[in-house]
Image (cartoon, rainbow, N blue to C red):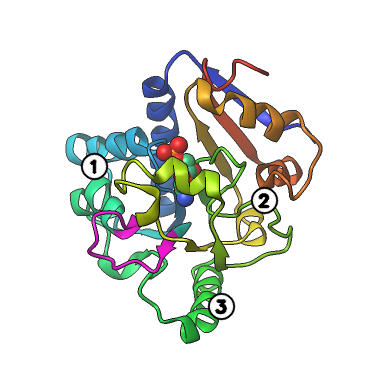
Amino acid sequence: EKIHNEIFLNSADASKLVAKEIAELIISKRQQGENCVLGLATGSSPINVYAELVRLHKEEGLDFDNVITFNLDEYWPMDRNNVHSYHYFMHEHLFKHINIRPENIHIPDGSIPQDKLMNYCLDYEENIKNAGGIDFQLLGIGRTGHIGFNEPGSHYNSGTRIITLDYLTRSDAASSFHGISNVPRKAITMGINTLKRAHRIVLLAWGQNKADIIKKSIEGEISSAIPATYLQNHQNTTFVLDKGAASEL
Ligand code: GLP
């Protein structure tokens, strides 16, 4: 299997095209009287996609009334009102600017107590199924090769669960947390199996510092050592890259 790649000069143009694909899916689903289920990611990579979706809503009337979202992951423990939470990120960059119904927004809750986590994760998985499965999944990639927070060692058949973050992942997050000691050690994440059931996957990566992990993910042997290589087995995945991220392919 070969992953399909699209390489752009810059991330701004690439992000507009990805937002356009999402908008067209939302519209075509509505025309069929159906909901559109989006799997959403955080991090710096998708910010311009969300900005473009907000623009399409405000300037072109893109309607999010039939949209249901499931976010990939959240730090644990993490209060939803904390500025470092993915909950906060999603509201700031997308949800508070569009007309999505609050009950259609799903983000793993980082404040779930430890003894309730297992059932909470099973329910999250169940909610995705009940919504009809993910139509379109947006992904970033961490420098360990993680997708969502599926760190190296993640099983091919893993579902939503609590995981321990790699040191490299925590050190990449350290600057925004003002020091690695403030970065949570764990996170709730959708699993590899959750992701591979999505009908369509678009992975975004920008900049030279992603070039090495992009090469390994696309050209390397499929292995739990680099979870993004599992995407090579998915029928409808596109890696959307800028010049820098594609520079070692
Ligand atoms: C975090 C997120 C991932 C994201 C990654 C890369 O680890 N949990 O979903 O893909 O960061 O972040 P960035 O897009 O800022 O490079």
Compare marks 1 and 2 and give the one earlier in the sequence: 1
Asked if residue 215 is among those painted magenta in the image, a careful observer would answer no
Residue in view at x 54 percent, y 43 percent: 168
- Give the residue at mark 3: 122
Instruction: Describe residue 133's horizontal placement relative to residue 62 as left or right.
Output: right
Residue type at mark 2 is: Pro
Residue in view at x 66 percent, y 54 percent: 196
- Give the residue at mark 2: 152
Compare marks 2 and 3 and give the one earlier in the sequence: 3
Q: Position of residue 56 (x, y in %)?
A: 26, 36
The single residue placed furthest to the bottom in the displayed view is: 115
Nearer to me, 226 or 175: 175
- Alpha carbons under labels 1 and 3: distance apart: 33 Å
- Give the residue at mark 1: 57
The region drawn magenta spans 74-87
Q: Residues within 10 Å of mark 3 (few under 14, many from 20)?
A: few
Q: Residue 189, relative to residue 124: is it above or below?
A: above
Nearer to me, 21 or 207: 207
Q: Residue 41, relative to residue 237: is it above or below?
A: below
Q: Position of residue 48 (x, y in %)?
A: 33, 33
- The C terminus sits in image quarter: top right
Residue type at mark 1 is: His
Q: Position of residue 15 (x, y in %)?
A: 40, 29
**For discs 2 and 3, the disc positioned in front in the rendered view:** 2
